[in-house]
Structure formats: C-alpha cells, structure tokens
Image (cartoon, grey):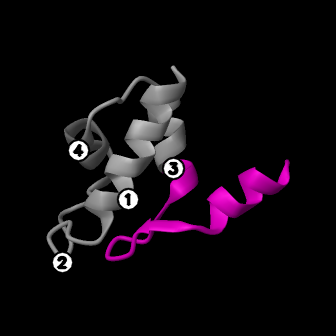
Amino acid sequence: MDEQEIIDGLKTICICKGIRKKVFKQLLEDGKTTIEELRQATGAGSGPCGGQRCTPRLNELLADYLGRH
C-alpha cells in the first residue's frame, strides 16, 4: 500500500454518510462514471446536507478520473 492509498482511505468525501475517497475511486474503476451512479451505489448526497458538501468533491474526483482515462 502506497502513501496515496493510505490518504485516500482516511479522506472523507461524504461527511454525512462517512464515505471515504477510496470507496469512490474503486467505484470509478468498476465503471460507475456519473455522479448519479456514485450516489446510487453509496447513498452520498442523501444525508442532512443534501449533497451540498460532497457534490463539489465528487465532481472534482470525477473530472480528475475522466481526465486521466
């Protein structure tokens, strides 16, 4: 396990649901490449904030992933 994998395992993207960055990265690798697919798979965006905190982070993660693939 490299340093980035450790950081991704600790970094929370969806604070309301406690979903870590590594979960979303794995879903992207598994072919879920839209915000809606990521939300359906994890429940992100359905917490008390209604996605106000995680949506920008998800958009950034998705743009970075799609930019590399």
Mark 3: secondary structure: helix
Q: Which structural element holds mark 1? A: helix
| Badge number at residue 23 | 3
First reached walking from the N terminus: tag 1 or tag 2: 2
Q: Residues within 10 Å of mark 1 (few under 14, many from 20)?
A: some
Q: Amino acid at mark 3?
A: Val
Name the residue tied to disc 2.
49
Tell me how far mark 3 sits from mark 4, CA to CA. 13 Å
The span from disc 1 to disc 4 (Cα, nearest Å) is: 16 Å
Q: Which residue is mark 4?
A: 40
Badge 2 marks a residue whose secondary structure is: loop
Q: Who comes first in sequence, dot 3 or dot 1?
A: 3
Q: Is residue 2 magenta?
A: yes
Which amino acid, by three-letter code, is at mark 4? Gln
In depth, the one of 45 and 64 nearer the eye is 64
- Name the mark nearer the viewer: 2 or 3: 2
The residue positioned 54% from the left and 26% from the top of the image is 68
The residue carrying pointer 4 sits among few (fewer than 14), some (14 to 19) or many (20 or more) residues within 10 Å by Cα, namely: few
Mark closer to the observer (1, 2): 1
> Which of the 4 image quadrants contains residue 48?
bottom left
Q: State which tag comes first along the sequence, 4 or 2.
A: 4
Residues rendered magenta in the picture: 1-23
Q: Nearer the viewer, residue 61 or 44?
A: 61
Q: What is the CA distance from the residue labelled 4 to the residue labelled 2?
A: 16 Å
How far from the left and from the top, in percent, is residue 20? 51, 61
Question: Does 4 sit left or right of 1 as displayed?
Answer: left
